Amino acid sequence: MQASILEIYNETIRDLLSNRPCGIDQTDNSVPDLTIVDVCSVNEVSSLLKQAAQCRFVGRTQMNEQSSRSHFVLTLRICGINEVDSVEKLDKLLAACKALGVETQPMVIGELGIIPLFSCFDREKDITGFHIPPLEMVAILLTPIHTPLFGFCSRLPACKDFHACKWPQGLSNGDMSLSMYFDAMNDKQLEMMKEVKIKCDHIITFSHFVPRQELCPEKRMLFYPKLPKIIGSDSLENRIRSIHGAEGRKDASSACHVLMLLLMVSDICTLSF
């Protein structure tokens, strides 16, 4: 693990570990001559923080005799080899939720039934042999944002499914295996789903992916036209209809599916059945 600490004061960058001004490499918005120190413990990081605090610009105000006059940026770089695949990570996450009392299974709350559904995207059926590069999304309203440290920033990373995820043998982004695997995880909750359907007149299901491709806006309306390739799931639609019925449950007072997406912005869409 490595640490560096800088200060932004009056649009000037100073290295607080060497107490000197620094420049910015305009080609990649980095600070090439910044002091970087190897650290191995919390105590070592705390020691660097105390050292850096002695070099900060401060000034007296009516509220604080040692008020900070700058932005203080601590960067920790952690390097290593991650041997755990994404399925194992999910299992650990679900185990942590259970230990903390966070419910991730179907449950009944009063007269309301809640059913979270596992899912993953299917490949868009009319496109074959494509390669999805790292997606980028345009910053707010496509307007570049000026920052003292990074200058004009106009693009942010949006999706890492094809680059950060590491799948075990037998699962791949290139076929239907992921969609089928995550849908099969719902089979472990069938008894609890049946209980919800028996006891509740009001049922809410929710997922991260879109159950029907036509719910996605037309490609010409999207910031990223390839978005439909990574958001829809036929397996999810079939799963939802097995709960709510193909045309809605006749004996239910109400039923809906909530779609929770992290795309250009955080959206929540409610789809009635």
Image (cartoon, rainbow, N blue to C red):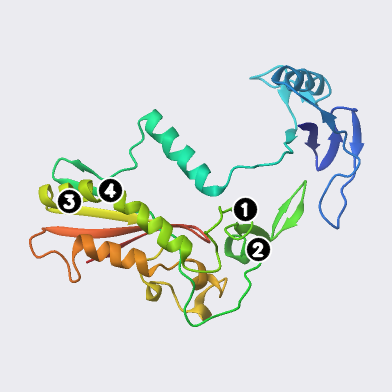
Q: Label 1, label 2: how many angstroms apart (C-alpha)?
A: 10 Å
Residue at left offset 29%, top offset 67%: 238
Tag shown at residue 194: 3
Tag shown at residue 246: none
Going from the N terminus, do you reach mark 1 or mark 4 first? Answer: 1
Q: How many discs mark residues in the rendered view? A: 4
Pointer 4 residue: 189
Residue at left offset 26%, top offset 45%: 106
- Looking at the image, residue 191 lies above or below residue 141: above
* 3 vs 1, front mark: 3
Pointer 1 residue: 164
Q: What SS does tag 4 mark? A: helix
Q: Label 3, label 2: how many angstroms apart (C-alpha)?
A: 40 Å
Q: Label 4, label 3: how many angstroms apart (C-alpha)?
A: 9 Å
Q: What SS does tag 1 mark? A: loop
Pointer 2 residue: 134
Q: Name the kind of residue labelled 2 in the image.
A: Pro
In the rendered view, does 176 fall on the left or right side of 32? Answer: left
Q: Label 4 crowding class (10 Å Cα cut-off): few <14, some 14-19, many 20+?
A: some
* 1 vs 2, front mark: 1
- Looking at the image, residue 159 lies above or below residue 44: below
Q: Label 1, label 4: how many angstroms apart (C-alpha)?
A: 28 Å
In the rendered view, does 219 fall on the left or right side of 216? Answer: right
Q: Name the kind of residue labelled 1 in the image.
A: Ala
Label 2 with label 4: CB-CB less than 8 Å: no
Q: Name the kind of residue labelled 3 in the image.
A: Lys
Going from the N terminus, do you reach mark 3 or mark 2 first? Answer: 2
Specify the quadrant that holds the C terminus: bottom left
Q: What SS does tag 2 mark? A: loop
Q: What SS does tag 3 mark? A: helix
Direction front: furthest residue: 169
